Image: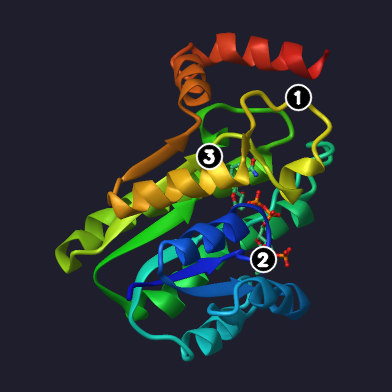
Amino acid sequence: MKRVLITGATSGIGKALVDIYTKKNFEVVAAGRDPIKLANLKQDYPKIKTLSFDITQLQQALDAASEVNNIDQLILNAGNCEYMESVNPFDSALFERVIRTNLLSVGYCLEAFLPKLARFGQIGIVSSSVTYLAFTQSQAYGASKAGLNYLARSLSVDLASQEIGVSLIQPGFVETPLTDKNTFDMPSKVTAEYAAKTIFNGIQAKKHSIKFPRFFISILRLLSTLPFALWRKIATSLVNK
Ligand SMILES: NC(=O)c1ccc[n+]([C@@H]2O[C@H](COP(=O)([O-])OP(=O)(O)OC[C@H]3O[C@@H](n4cnc5c(N)ncnc54)[C@H](OP(=O)(O)O)[C@@H]3O)[C@@H](O)[C@H]2O)c1
């Protein structure tokens, strides 16, 4: 039986991944920071193993890793989104918080769990489609996810000799508690179940890149080819609406 470890398994995309991986007969190690949410998850999926740790704390990640071995698939999904209310004055505390939760934490989890990954294993790193374009108030979230894009690509190069693959995952808008907080329009929003199924299939196929939904990503890609001066005008006009 293959084993998967999923961070951020207590909510949204991570929880939907637990559901699909369980149905596909994987041994699921579900990681989260809230013991009550993990206990509730275990009630719904009695066969899973749960791991409770805060991804922003290296020692907690290392301690958690001592409880698992032989992981075939490692999905680093946990993260948070905080938008910047203003950039002048610049809220460096928020910036640090988001970079720590979304980017540094992945480094901690890699230090902890990479030695546990089996040969021919696959890592999934959940970034975002936000990195295609510069959006208002997204300085911290976008920078954290752009960092993940580079990390995933560069990791993939160096892990090739160990037969370990890396899938860079860039979702568009997904209906989860994270996006429930948003007050703006979210075009082409998909369900967490759709996201999990797409990620699952992509990881089994060892895809380097998993992006969805397709039409939304195509539009972002097209817009990203515009000269920045033109995109800046469009983005600024959206801010002033
Ligand atoms: N939803 C979208 O539209 C969307 C789009 C692109 C990318 N993403 C990315 O997809 C990933 C999952 O997002 P989601 O929408 O499913 O969000 P979510 O429903 O808020 O779930 C986030 C998960 O991460 C966990 N987490 C957050 N901080 C943590 C920490 N310090 N230590 C341990 N666990 C922590 C949360 O635990 P708690 O339940 O304890 O808070 C929760 O399980 C994130 O990386 C997000 O940036 C989401």
Q: Is residue 127 visible?
A: no
| Residue that extends furthest to the left in the rendered view of this protein | 161
Check disc 3 and report the residue beneath it: 171
Q: Quadrant of residue 137?
A: top right
Which-is-in-front pick, marks 3 and 2? 2
Q: Residues within 10 Å of mark 2 (few under 14, many from 20)?
A: many
Q: Quadrant of the N terminus?
A: bottom left
Mark 3 vs mark 2: which is more N-terminal?
2
Three-letter code for the amino acid on which mark 3 is drawn: Pro
- Judge the density around disc 3: few (<14), some (14-19), many (≥20) Cα neighbours within 10 Å: many
Q: Nearer the viewer, residue 233 or 217?
A: 217
Hey, what amino acid is under mark 2?
Answer: Thr
Query: In terms of sequence position, does the residue under pointer 2 or pointer 1 come before the other?
Result: 2
Q: Up-down: is 124 above or below 150?
A: below
Residue to which mark 2 is pinned: 10
Give yes or no for contact between labels 3 and 2 (Cβ–Cβ under 8 Å).
Answer: no
Ligand 1 within 8 Å of disc 2? The answer is: yes
Q: In percent of the image, x 76 and y 24: which residue is there?
A: 185
Toward which corner of the image does residue 97 lie, by quadrant? bottom right
Label 3: state its secondary structure.
Answer: strand
Q: How many marks?
A: 3
Is the CB of mark 3 within 8 Å of ligand 1?
Answer: yes
Q: Earlier in the sequence, mark 1 or mark 3?
A: 3
Q: CA distance from mark 3 to mark 2?
A: 18 Å
Cα–Cα gap, marks 1 and 3: 16 Å
The x and y percentages for residue 122 are 32, 62
Q: Position of residue 148 (x, y in %)?
A: 47, 51
Between the C-alphas of marks 2 and 1, the distance is 26 Å
**Residue placed under numbered mark 1 in the picture:** 185
